[in-house]
Image: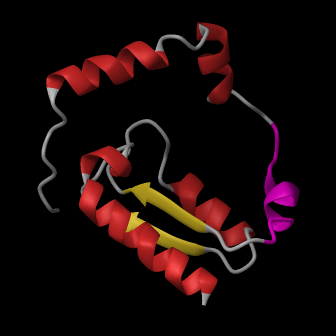
Amino acid sequence: MRHVSPLPGPLVQRMLGESLRVAPAVRAALFDRTVDSAELLRTVDVPTLVVHGTEDAVVDPSSAEYAAGKIPGASMRWFEGVGHMPFTECVDEFDQALLEFAKRALG
């Protein structure tokens, strides 16, 4: 597992504060839904990159595998040793993966 630098304290505090702006009932519902999204995912008809950190303790990594397996032609990009927010935990690597995907998608 590669080392990921911890986020700066002020950034963590700001992100936590922003997440708390969402009503508790809404946050709870995100993890308690019973809707099956398979049919919807099968209708996605644009280039799709599913990204997920292997150490995500918020959303189970199997959800990324599920989505990538349902979206026709989806690409999957794992971030080893990264948690829930690869876009902040490994910014350069995330940006590079997104840039490479966009180049492939645009031809």
| Colouring scheme applied when the structure was drawn | secondary structure
User: Is 64 left, or right, of 7 in this rendering?
Assistant: right
- Name the spot of residue 69 as percent of width and height, x first: 67, 71
Tell me the quadrant of the picture where the N terminus can be found. Answer: bottom left
Asked if residue 106 can be seen in this view, the reply is: yes
Asked which quadrant contains residue 79, the reply is bottom left
Task: Give the residue at x 28% y 54%.
Answer: 91
Furthest-bottom residue in this view: 107
Task: Give the residue at x 74% y 31%.
Answer: 33
In front of the other: 68 or 13? 13
Q: Is residue 105 above or below residue 99?
A: below
User: Is 17 left, or right, of 47 in this rendering?
Assistant: left
- Name the spot of residue 13 as percent of width and height, x first: 27, 17
Q: Is residue 94 above or below residue 59?
A: below
Q: Is residue 87 above or below residue 67?
A: above
Asked which quadrant contains residue 25, the reply is top right
User: Is 13 left, or right, of 32 in this rendering?
Assistant: left
| Residue 10, magenta (yes or no) | no
Task: Give the residue at x 25% y 54%.
Answer: 90
User: Is 78 left, or right, of 3 in this rendering?
Assistant: right
The part of the chain drawn in magenta is 35-45
Tell me the quadrant of the picture where the C terminus can be found. Answer: bottom right
Asked if residue 79 can be seen in this view, the reply is: no
- Name the spot of residue 71 as percent of width and height, x first: 73, 69
